[in-house]
Amino acid sequence: MRIEKDSMGELPVPDEAYYGIQTVRSLANYDVTDRTYDDYPCMVRAMAEVKKACAITNRNIEALDASKAQAIIQACDEIIAGRFAGQFPVKVSRGAGTSFNMNVNEVIANRANEILTGTKGYVLVHPNNHVNMCQSSNDTMPTVENIVLYRESGAVAKAARTLEDALAQKTLQFADVVRVGRTALQDAVPMTLGQVFAGFRGGVRRNRRLLEAFRETYRQVVIGGTVLGTGIGILPGYYEQIHRNLSVVLGFEVLPPSGTEGEVDLIPNEHMFVGMQNPDHFLIISGYLKSLACVAGKIANDLRLLASGPDAGFGEIELPAPGGAAAAIAGDGASLCEWVSGVAQQVSAGDWATTMSVTQCDADIASGARVAFDSVLDSLLMLRTCLDLFAGECVRTITANVETCRNNAEHSTSLATMVSTLYGYEVGTRIARLAYAEGMTCKEAALKEGLIEPDAAEELFDVRRLSQRERTVEMFAKYGKLRRVK
């Protein structure tokens, strides 16, 4: 053990640890969960990227010695590469992120000193004076959150696109598979299985686009605002460079907070204060994630219903049998669908937690939104895996029971709708009752009653034609002379 000292006293720190006394204090104060930042490498990476950009900026404005800056940059690069996994034991969901910020500062400082001197310790590079120069937990942590949310929402959008593509494939594959549609689970009218999957795809696409559009919000970051947005403690030239340097480190552009185009600020730097104080963006992205998750959950429940059986269910489609990743996680296609529905419930629960958290942000900084961020991040990580697995292990392997689908469509008493359109509701009802009572199709009942000639009946009761609006209208134009409704 080595002994480290701060303003509160001394504490032993494990010799092998790159973190220091601030991290040790945090472990004693908040030992109420098993989840640490080591469980979230996306957070560790983003914080190291912020620290790297800050070191570059402080070097460029000659506030930080070049050799110290280079050692800090090298340490950050090593963290970004994943070398120091296990060195970030601070527990999540605690405060505004000060403990995590200091944890990373200490790891970087100890590694930078090791690079320069061969040993840990803050002889040349100090976690506060050098690594945290021109920064505060209040601007580094929200910036890290935005970086992570930008990346992870992009990953979810990509997974949603994968699900869209799988549903599009099935839309085309099942375009000619006619089935009976249902309202309130009762027989309705003919439609194709392709039309069902087109509806599925449209719901995913709409919500994916909403998420992608809002994702751009996270390019605006509050780095440089330090404690409350005033920028106290930053040195000349820092703010003019930090966003550009951070963009280079990240590989995508980030910008200072701003309003909509043409909007006039009432006071200087108005939108920095907006960014520091208001956590409503968590509510918005959480809502989009909930909507996307629930659309996926609804699809999963519908697929499970359509695949129900084998003897007493709908039996219109076949879900994948046990095997592959689906078996490892869910057991079979039906269980995987059940799991997707469960993810939707969990994301919805996270949305509730987000809502409650946002209301607890007091005064001048959104420190109470820690739970909101954790909930949103967990939802993103769950949903990314869920959508990818749902697409690859379930949707892409679905097959249709073509004969079952067509037989259900042709024997549905809802086909009496054609008779009602031509002869009125009372006649249609009579045909439906006759078909049901004698176990025949509505076409057979109409022929038995002598309502329609056989050649006309073949067209008018063709379930494939009845699933297409244009062809249905064409039939009524052709056989309009049969219509008796006045």
Image: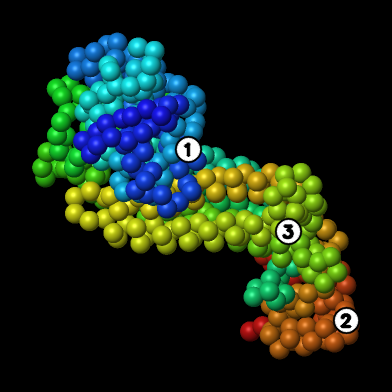
Residue 439 badge: 2
How far across and how far down the image is residue 252, in percent? 40, 28
Residue beneath the point at 65% across and 63% down:
301
Q: Which sits in the foreground, 460 or 173?
A: 173
What residue is shown with label 3? 334
Q: Count residues near mark 1 (Cα–Cα under 10 Å), then give few for <14, some for 14-19, many for 20+.
A: some
- Viewer-side label of 1, 2: 1
Q: Amino acid at mark 1?
A: Asp
What residue is shown with label 1? 38
How far across and how far down the image is residue 245, in percent? 31, 22
Quarter of the image that includes the C terminus: bottom right
Residue beneath the point at 78% across and 83% down:
432
Label 2 element class: loop
Label 3 element class: helix
Q: Earlier in the sequence, mark 1 or mark 2?
A: 1
Q: Earlier in the sequence, mark 2 or mark 3?
A: 3
Q: Amino acid at mark 2?
A: Gly
Q: CA distance from mark 1 to mark 2?
A: 65 Å
Q: Count residues near mark 3 (Cα–Cα under 10 Å), then give few for <14, some for 14-19, many for 20+.
A: many
Residue beneath the point at 10% across and 42% down:
267
Q: CA distance from mark 2 to mark 3?
A: 32 Å
Q: Which sits in the foreground, 253 or 434?
A: 253
Residue 41 lies left or right of residue 397; in this view the side is left
